[in-house]
Image (cartoon, rainbow, N blue to C red):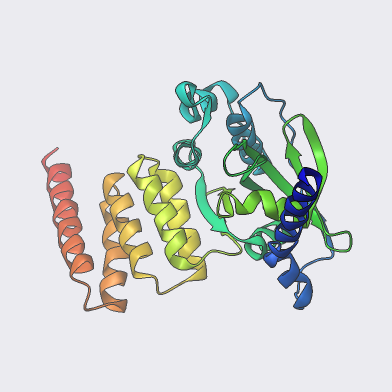
Amino acid sequence: MNKKILFLFFAIWVSSCASNTVQTDSLYRSPNSLKASVNNIAPYIEQEVGHCGPATLAMAIAATGSPYKIDEITSQVYTPNAKGSLQENMTTTARRQGFMALQITGLKSLLAELDAGHSVIIFENLGINWIPQWHYALVTGYDLANKTLIMHSGPHPNQFIDMGEFELSWRLTNYWALVVLNPGDLSASSDEVTHLQAAAALERVQKLDAAKRAYLGILSAWPRSLIARIGLGNVYYNLGDYSSAVSYLQAATELHPDSIEARTNLQIAKEALLAAGRNSLAR
């Protein structure tokens, strides 16, 4: 009797797993414009036990072609009491390092980023809901014909993972993923608002040059963006370049005459520019 119950439980569990690969199943039912296979270049970094967060973030930064300091990243992202890295800290640390960090969700978004040449940090549960085993990995590519993803995961570089199996472990974290980009580069799957939020976050951590490049990148994709122009005005103002601040805020008021924030900031920038001119003459 016990064996029958165990077998029934196993059969239900297998059936449940099979029915939960909704995103993978949907991907193969619908036509898409993705490349057949992608394997982006991303250096593999070995990791200590429990340090998958710092290592994965360092790999994502290295994948942008930028240098990284693993000790500095670890000190910012790793939480000793938790014996791991919180998702919020992964995002914040990427921004403190001067990078655009954009959260994405879902398999289609993940593949779109990979197709665009962006490796993606994912957070998954390799255990089960009541006995979780949280884990970060860097997805670097995919092979549609074989239904596999390629990732640097734990001690395994360039590991091939079945897409459906991955979806099951990823689903347990609500499909959390993070794209780390050089400022000015754009996510392939994120909208204007998400980009603006990431750029504004760079301002908040005083990465002003990075924020400037991020806003300029946003304007290249969304030329009428009010918030990007206001953001650039604020960045240039804080950098002491009042002339450029006035220029971007003036454009913001012309494109969006109803924006009180743009008009107010423009007035402040103009006053700062005049004061700077008077101080220059006084010297």
Instruction: Residue at 30% x, 70% y: name it.
Output: 252
Q: Residue furthest right?
A: 145
Q: Residue furthest front?
A: 1
175, 269: nearer the viewer: 175
- Would residue 249 appear left or right of 45 to someone viewing this image? left
211, 145: nearer the viewer: 145
Instruction: Residue at 17% x, 50% y: name it.
Output: 277
- Would residue 234 appear left or right of 25 to someone viewing this image? left
Q: Quadrant of residue 107?
A: bottom right
Q: Is residue 131 visible?
A: yes
Q: Residue 218, how many percent across, how many down?
A: 47, 63
177, 125: nearer the viewer: 125
Instruction: Residue at 36% x, 40% y: name it.
Output: 205
Q: Is residue 41 visible?
A: no
Q: Quadrant of residue 138?
A: top right
State the quadrant of the C terminus. top left
- Looking at the image, is 35 positioned above or below residue 12? below
Q: Residue 118, how many percent across, how many down?
A: 67, 53
Instruction: Residue at 18% x, 70% y: name it.
Output: 260
- Looking at the image, is 90 positioned above or below residue 189? above
Q: Quadrant of residue 45?
A: top right
Q: Residue 240, how many percent across, how many down?
A: 27, 45
Q: Residue 104, how many percent across, how many down?
A: 55, 57
Q: How many marks?
A: 0
